[in-house]
Amino acid sequence: MSVRLADGITFEEFDPLTKRDVEGLQAMFTDYLLEEFERINELAFGNPAAGFLMTVFIHVDGQDAGFMALDAARRAVEIIYVKPEYRGRGLATLALRHTADACPQKLALKTPLSPGGEALAEQLDLARADNLPHEEAKNEQALQTIRNGIKATCTHGKKGGDPRKLCQRCYRKTLRRYAEMMVEKSVAEARAARGRY
């Protein structure tokens, strides 16, 4: 699926069976997690792709400029991310406005929102969608798994660091692995689904 948003700007549906798409999504999701880590010093919640999500790339002149993951059943944007070099061009606004116009009900952004997400929600009059209890439980489980993994494997804190704080270097390394794992999980689900039909 390809949808033209403006001159040189398109939505392209993520294909979990295409190496280029998988690598592109992994790279952008990693960047998203690391940027949010710098802002909130913790794992940012949200799935880049899954069976219940429709994930699209935002392309500018055929190049990956960002992505959006949409929970169509809840009419809520799980994640929207634009690469730093493409920011300031209104791509997120364009993508959200197009999606909101196509949505039969009021479009929402899943919380918690970054300051930029809050500004977009206000500007475009979008609703906010809190995580459902099972989503909240999965988020907490992922966070605890990451924290426990860092505590169990990090040797940096034992070399004079503050033992009460998680090692920032190991946290970033773990977030990179987490990003790859989350995208690979959606690839495995897509392969399994195609194998059944």
Image: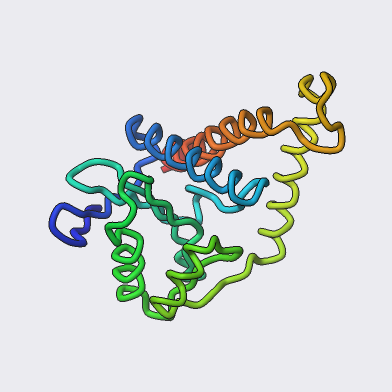
Quarter containing the C terminus: top left
Q: Position of residue 110 (x, y in %)?
A: 55, 65
- Name the foreground residue: 124 vs 77: 124
For residue 144, which quarter of the picture? top right
Q: Position of residue 173 (x, y in %)?
A: 62, 28
Which residue corresponds to the image point at 31% horizontal and 57% vertical from the top-left?
88
- Name the foreground residue: 182 vs 84: 84
Q: Is residue 151 left or right of residue 13?
A: right
Q: Is residue 120 above or below residue 1?
A: below
Residue lying farthest to the left in this orientation: 7
For residue 21, which quarter of the picture? top left
Q: Is residue 76 above or below residue 16?
A: below
- Name the foreground residue: 165 vs 82: 165
Q: Is residue 39 left or right of residue 8?
A: right
Q: Position of residue 58 (x, y in %)?
A: 30, 51
Q: Is residue 76 above or below residue 78?
A: below
Which residue corresponds to the image point at 22% horizontal and 54% vertical from the top-left?
10
Residue lying farthest to the front in this orientation: 160
Which residue corresponds to the image point at 50% horizontal and 77% vertical from the top-left?
127
Q: Position of residue 136 (x, y in %)?
A: 70, 59
Q: Is residue 163 above or below residue 135?
A: above
Which residue corresponds to the image point at 22% horizontal and 58% vertical from the top-left?
3
All told, the count of numbered labels is: 0
- Name the foreground residue: 75 vs 114: 114
For residue 154, which quarter of the picture? top right
The structure's colour scheme is rainbow
